[in-house]
């Protein structure tokens, strides 16, 4: 069976019309995200987009045990949305999921549209909505931030899992009365891990860069040291990636248990398949090196996207 990482749908699980609809939705929403982020991105968010893209990519390589021989890992949509807003989170998550598919053959190319929609758009917006609602109810405290982010992280994972079940059902891969409870059930457990990691990351940021949680959007923080530190943290995470739990992941477990795992189609090409470098034979080293490559690439894309959308914002605020 082909490896499937969390909610990364491989080709073969979605029908061609459903996959095409996913691509149209992805292109339309990413286009909107580019325009919306141009009006919202402040100077401090430019390096943060790259750092968060790198961290989410690295963290997604580390699976944690869930239950019943199943594992899970951070998706990250809610975490990024809390720190950058949902539209910028769409760009960060699209860069991560896109690199995973194009370079590491993690998730199908036809299925890429809905992989981005599920993990990068639904998880970000549902997560941010829960976070914002909690903050309105509880006030502008870190306790409210933590509770809202935890709720948003859990709900974002569940919403993405439910959306995946609907897509599988519409494609005829698995009946809805089978796919929906199976996907929602296993990802209810994965969502707990997502919530814990999200709150832990925010607590760390509160101690090291509280301005990223408290300053008004658009305020700048000078100095490149924290950018280098953020990248080093993401790179350090890849060093422990060989210790990831080897058990079946969420969608992979559901596919195996309910008899549609064989529908997965092999990728049309391979570059760094399954997070390995072909000429490195040591299992741990090949995983680490591929992770470092991925971290640097998605960080560069994140920085590039931020620079692409930032100039108009700078022009309108330059006198202030």
Image (cartoon, helix red, strand yellow):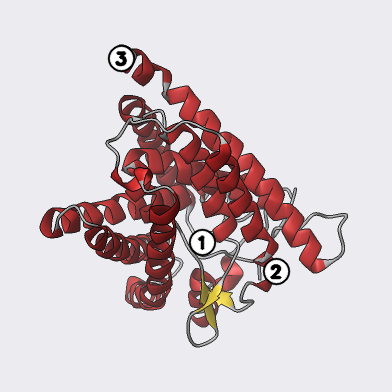
Residue identified by numbered label 3: 316
Which callout, 1 or 3, points to the residue nearer the camera? 3
Judging by the rendered image, the residue that carries numbered circle 1 is: 13
Disc 3 to disc 2, C-alpha distance? 46 Å
Q: CA distance from mark 1 to mark 2?
A: 28 Å
Q: Residues within 10 Å of mark 3 (few under 14, many from 20)?
A: few
Q: Which residue is mark 2?
A: 242
Disc 1, SS: loop
Badge 3 element: helix
**Is 13 left or right of 288, judged from the image as shown?**
left
Q: Quadrant of residue 284?
A: bottom right
Marking on residue 315: none
Residue 103, horizontal then vertical, whole percent = 67, 46
Q: Is residue 272 left or right of residue 301?
A: right
Residue 98 vertical placement versus 39 (above, below): below
Q: Residue at x 51, y 59 (%)?
A: 9
Of all residues shown, which one is farthest toward the bottom? 68
On the rendered image, what quadrant is the N terminus found in? Answer: bottom right
Pick the front one: 189 or 98:
189
Foreground of the two, 241 or 162: 241
Please tell me which of labels 3 and 2 falls first in the chain.
Answer: 2
Which residue corresponds to the image point at 27% horizontal and 36% vertical from the top-left? 216
Location of residue 72 in the rendering, given as x and y in whole percent from the top left corner: 50, 71
Which callout, 1 or 3, points at the residue further toward the start of the chain?
1
Residue at 67% x, 58% y is 266
Question: Label 1 vs label 3: CA separation?
Answer: 46 Å
Nearest to viewer (mark 1 / mark 2): 2
User: How many other residues sit within 10 Å of disc 1, few (<14), some (14-19) or many (≥20)?
Assistant: many
Q: Taking the image as drawn, is residue 10 in sight?
A: no
Mark closer to the observer (3, 2): 3
Residue 165, located in which quarter of the rendered image?
bottom left
């Amino acid at each position: 069976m082909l490896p499937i990482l969390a909610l990364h749908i491989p080709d073969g699980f979605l029908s061609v019309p459903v996959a095409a609809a996913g691509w149209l939705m992805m292109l339309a929403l990413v286009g909107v995200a580019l325009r919306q982020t141009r009006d919202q991105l402040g100077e401090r968010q430019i390096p943060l987009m790259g750092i968060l893209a790198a961290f989410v990519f690295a963290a997604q390589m580390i699976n944690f045990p869930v239950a019943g021989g199943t594992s899970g890992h951070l998706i990250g949509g809610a975490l990024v949305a809390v720190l950058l807003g949902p539209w910028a989170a769409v760009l960060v998550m699209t860069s991560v999921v896109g690199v995973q598919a194009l370079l590491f053959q993690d998730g199908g190319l036809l299925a890429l549209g809905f992989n981005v929609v599920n993990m990068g758009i639904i998880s970000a917006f549902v997560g941010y909505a829960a976070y914002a609602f909690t903050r309105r109810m509880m006030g502008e405290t870190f306790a409210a931030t933590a509770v809202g982010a935890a709720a948003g992280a859990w709900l974002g994972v569940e919403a993405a899992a439910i959306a995946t079940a609907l897509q599988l059902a519409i494609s005829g891969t698995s009946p809805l009365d089978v796919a929906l409870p199976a996907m929602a059930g296993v990802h209810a457990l994965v969502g707990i891990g997502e919530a814990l990691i999200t709150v832990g990351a925010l607590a760390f940021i509160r101690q090291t860069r509280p301005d990223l949680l408290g300053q008004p959007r658009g305020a700048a923080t000078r100095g490149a040291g924290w950018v280098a530190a953020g990248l080093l943290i993401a790179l350090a995470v890849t060093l422990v990636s060989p210790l990831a739990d080897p058990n079946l992941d969420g969608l992979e477990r559901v596919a195996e248990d309910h008899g549609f795992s064989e529908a997965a189609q092999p990728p049309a090409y391979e570059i760094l398949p399954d997070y390995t470098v072909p000429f490195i034979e040591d299992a741990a080293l090949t995983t680490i090196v591929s992770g470092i490559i991925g971290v640097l690439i998605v960080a560069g894309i994140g920085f590039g996207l931020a620079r692409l959308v930032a100039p108009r914002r700078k022009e309108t605020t330059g006198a202030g």
